[in-house]
Every structure is written in C-alpha cells, then in structure tokens.
Amino acid sequence: MAAQKYSLVTIYESAGKVVDTVIDKSSDSPIDPAKSRKTKVAVIGVGYLGKIHARIYHAMGNVDLVAVVDTDIQAVESVCEQFGCQGMTRIEDLPRDIEAVSIVVPTSLHLPVSEYFLQRKVHTMLEKPIAPSVVESQKIVDAAEESRAILQIGHLERFNAGVMKLAELADDPRFIEVHRLGTFVERATDVDVVTDLMIHDIDIVLSLVDSPLCHVSATGTSVVTDHVDIANARLEFENGAVANVTASRVSRNQFRRIRVFSRQHYLGLNFADQQLEEVLPGEIKPGSRFPELINRKIDVKPQLPLNAELDHFIQCVQTNAPPLVTGHHGLVAVKVAEIVRQKIADSM
C-alpha cells in the first residue's frame, strides 16, 4: 500500500498571524491560504475607527480589502497608500463586485448608507448604534430582511472574551450592576453618553436576561457638553431581574466592570483586562451554620474584540450564518436607549 501523503494547513487568527498548524490528510499538496476563498470588502468611512477596520481587514487571510470610501480625500489617500487598496469619495464609484462592507460613518448617516448597500444585497457590518432613532433603525432592519443580506451591528463588547465567557456561565441573573466610566475626550461628543457608551451595556444586559423589559427609570445630566454626559438607568424585567447601569464620560479615571448576581452565584468581570471572577457557596464546615464562600478566577484568554468581531462577520458572510449581534438586537438596544433618554429628559 502506498504511503499516505500529508499536507500542512495553517490556521490564521483575525489579525492574519499564524497561530497554529495542523496536519491535513485530505490533500496531496500544500494549501496556500492566499489562494483560498477571499471575501471582497470595502470600508465606508476611514476616520479614527474606520482606519482600524481597514487595517484589520488588510491583515486577514480570507479577505481582499478592495477599497475605502470617505469624503476626506486625504484620509482616503493615506489608507490607500498604507494598504494598497482603491479609494474614492463616493460609494457609487465602488466596484460592483464588492461582497461586504464595514460602515463606519457618523450615526446620522447610517440609514442612507446602509440602505444603499443592503438594497444591493451587500453584506453589511454597521457600527453601533444601528441608527439615531427607532424609526430609522427599523428601516435598516427591514432593508436587511428584504434583501436577505447579513446585517451585523457593531456592539463591540459582545466579542470581549470575558463577556462571552460571562454569558456562558451566567444562570438566571437576578441583579446586574454595570459601570462604564471614562475620562472626557472630544470624539463622539455630538451624541449623549447613553448613545455613546451606555448602549453597550444595555445590549449586554438584554442578552443576559431572558425576559421582557417591563419598567425603566433613569436620571442624568450634562457636565461638559450640551448633551447628557453622565447617566444612570434601572432596568426591571418581568421575571424580577433588575439591572443598574451607569455610564459617564466625565470621570477622573476609567472604570469598566459588570457584576452579575444569580441564586448562589456571583460573577464579576473587568471589561478592560477581560478577567472573570466567580464566587459561589462551598461546603458547610462542622460547627458552622453557613457554607464557606469559594472565590476563584475563571481562565479567560483575552482577545482583541474588534478583530474578533470582524472575523466573525466575515465567517458569517462566507457560511451564510446569522451573526451574534443582528439588526434586531441593535434595534432593541436603540428602543431601550430611547426610553432611557426620555426618562432622563423628564427628570431634568
């Protein structure tokens, strides 16, 4: 019997670096990752965050970064020079064979830009929030459903490795407390802190609690900008679960943490280092009325959330799988954020 031939298949992470090599018995010759299926992608908007999208796509082995678009021609030229892609100032000038786009434009432009691509059946990764209002968000969701193109919303924290492990371990949360406090920066000051920061945690809370929301109370105030800069919301659910969410962009230090309390179970996560701790009751020792509390750290391998998010988007495009954060998830988060904003307005 002839000796069986083996070939090496390289597995790539989202940043395009080799992380593992395995033996594959299915081929007589080495497989070149560069010749495998590549999705043709364009990035719409190459400001601060859009440039990072372009960089990540450029490094991905299963993506062909074809073009970038921005009204700022200097920004376009800079990205094109760095990554060797095409550049234009109008989306209408993009090549017609683009299969997927990242839309990283101001929120006020999400509806017209996303509708343009969804109506042409182009798979769309749309930065959060999905739109500035419920009405516009619903129109985007409707356009995606009609076209059957994939629509993924950029709620980045869902791809935090700690959040993903937390979602796996959290069992029937009864109380959730979230703090997302940051120092003041001038970027994104055209919107309030609910739209800018709190919406991340609204989305996470809604993903953890499997029950309809029944009551919202909220308060907040402006400090530096003309919009609300610090806010607190209390979300109550029909099953009795409660979430207390605080967001600030005028704090002295950065602090991002979520605590989830379940029956006989506590989970605490630091968003920044993605490390998760767990507290649960152990055995009742002789002579004691109560069980000993066991404190332990959960082993979580940190990952770059944006890399993981874009890698997930491309995998969904290539396999026609639903994304972790759908247009519907983005719509519901905007609905709750809008209620929070109204409650704050009523309290001022």
Image (cartoon, grey):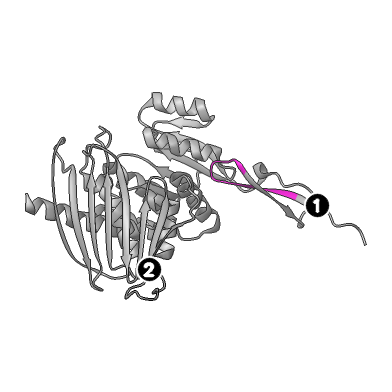
Q: Which residue is at 14% across, 38% downward?
A: 223
Callout 1 amino acid: Asp
Three-letter residue code for mark 2: Glu
Determine whether 279 is above or below 39 in the image.
below
Q: Quadrant of the N terminus?
A: bottom right
Q: Is residue 284 left or right of residue 20?
A: left
Camera-side residue of 28 and 283: 283
Circle 1 sits in a helix, a strand or a loop, which is it?
loop
Which type of secondary structure does the marked residue at label 2 adopt?
A: loop
Query: Mark 2 packing: few (<14 Cα in 10 Å), some, or many (20+)?
Result: few
Residue occupying image coordinates x 50% and y 39%: 56
- Judging by the rendered image, the residue that carries numbered circle 1 is 28
In the shown orientation, is residue 69 left or right of residue 249? right
| Structural crowding at the residue carrying mark 1, measured as other residues with C-alpha within 10 Å and reported as few (<14), some (14–19) or many (≥20) | few
Closer-to-camera residue (215/89): 215
In the rendering, at what x and y percent does residue 325 appear?
A: 39, 57
Is residue 9 part of the magenta span, yes or no? yes
Q: Is residue 148 visible?
A: no
| Residue for point 46% across, 29% down | 79
Q: Which mark is residue 292?
A: 2
Residue 219 against residue 216 in the figure, above or below = above
The residue range painted magenta reads 8-18
